[in-house]
Amino acid sequence: MRHTPLSTLRAVALATFTLLVLAPTVNAQDTELPDYVIAEYGTPPAVPTGPLSQRLQDAVRTVFVDSLERSEWTSVQAEALEVIAASGDPRLAWIISDMMRFTWRQSFDTALSDAATTLLGIELNTHQRWGAITDHLIAWDIPSYPGYLDTKRAIFTQFVPGWDRIFVPGDIDWRMVSWGGVRIDDRPYDQTDEICNCIPAADNPEVESADDATWLSDDAVVFGIEINGEARAYPRQIMEVREMVNDTLGGRDLGIPYCTLCGAAQAYFTDDVPPGVARPILRTSGLLIRSNKVMYDIETYSVFDTFLGHAVTGPLAEKGVKLEQATVITTTWGAWKAQHPDTSVLLERYALGRDFDFRNNRDANGPIFPVGDVDPRLSVHEDVIGVITASGTPVAFQRSKAVAALQQGADITFENVRLELAAGGLRAVDRDGSDLGSHEAFWFAWSQFHPGTELWTG
């Protein structure tokens, strides 16, 4: 394909901007960005308002729809990309970023990158161009243009047909959705032994007693859940592979997502839903939002905000389904079974013969997918215990300092929340000792899904 130098694109942009953008004025970002965003990413570009001009709409279709439908890249597409790059409209960098996630040729990736950096007014000194461009878009909160979802849907469904029921309007910020590198798990309920080219959820997994689980070492990390006096351990070795379990414990139905990227195992009650709504069966979509997995219900294809448990698209969003969380304690197998000698644990076979440790290997140097700006009060991978107070205030407790303080006999409270040691981990309880549905996560994940969260650091 023909490649236009970055300097040329910028020169054309200056000369032709006013000819191609329909909006009569160009406004700076309305939202004042935090100082730490400006320090890291610089000042955002001015962003026009209103719809795209017809010429730009045609260019967008030529580059991002026609090229995929026809499986070709010709001089026609290359010239249309030059028109987009010359528009001076940073909103178009979002759809370029989406296409970059699926590019397969270096020359194509370079052309897209040059167009995006021209629109954003940035220069990149990294080979991770897609990630750097997307980080800028997120951190600057660049808006999308009218019709963005339609074009994005055309790109994503061209590569994974199962996403056609996922990319629909709803209470979800489609700008933030990217591909996690795997396909959708769309296997029917309780048929999870079927082989799939996906991250395979486990439904109704078989379990064994602590005495029988000789394969699990005492220092192995597990996610412990106790419901109505019944305890079960979900080994991280298994959850790294499965990332989603639909289970029944203590007479309650649960959906248990684990996001390896966020260091967060969560447990949602899936039997407490509005009348007439069937139990949601949760699956991994293969998509991410700011490095957090996007889960959905296989029965209705309703998408959930994984971190918050709210249905954001589809029939379940229309019915206002919001799943309540149970506490998940991140600890070791030795500590969990010492506290819960009658615990059950998932069978080793659910690990599919794999033994990943993403935290200390793949993810050791920070998030591997774009997350944009991160609240600088803690490092991105600092472990926190997060919970919502009775007043609706999110609060995070820095795990390392909380454990040390509790071991020394300190009281840790915030509003109605009290933190306590539990089976080698931490949990949050109410004033009366009742469970508040807390879980552990990396700081970057908790803080971006709960912006402005309160933070206890000791």
Image (cartoon, helix red, strand yellow):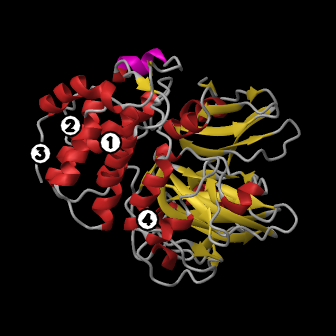
Q: Which secondary structure is most common in the magenta stretch? A: helix
Mark 4: few/some/many CA within 10 Å (<14, 14-19, 20+): some
Residue hosting label 3 = 3
Q: Which mark is residue 126?
A: 2
Place of residue 323 in the rendered image (x, y in percent of width and height, measured from the top left): 74, 55
Question: N-terminal of the two: label 1 or label 2?
Answer: 2
The answer to whether residue 297 is seen in the rendering is yes
How crowded pointer 2 is (Cα within 10 Å; few <14, some 14-19, many 20+) is rated as few
Q: How crowded is the residue under tag 1: few (<14 C-alpha within 10 Å), some, or many (20+)?
A: some
SS at mark 2?
A: loop
In the rendered image, residue 384, in percent from the top left (x then y), is placed at: 57, 37
Distance from the alpha carbon under mark 1 to that under mark 2: 9 Å
> How far, Cα to Cα, is label 3 from label 2?
19 Å
Q: Which residues are magenta?
A: 34-39
Rendered view: 94 above or below 220: above
Residue ID at (88%, 65%) = 275
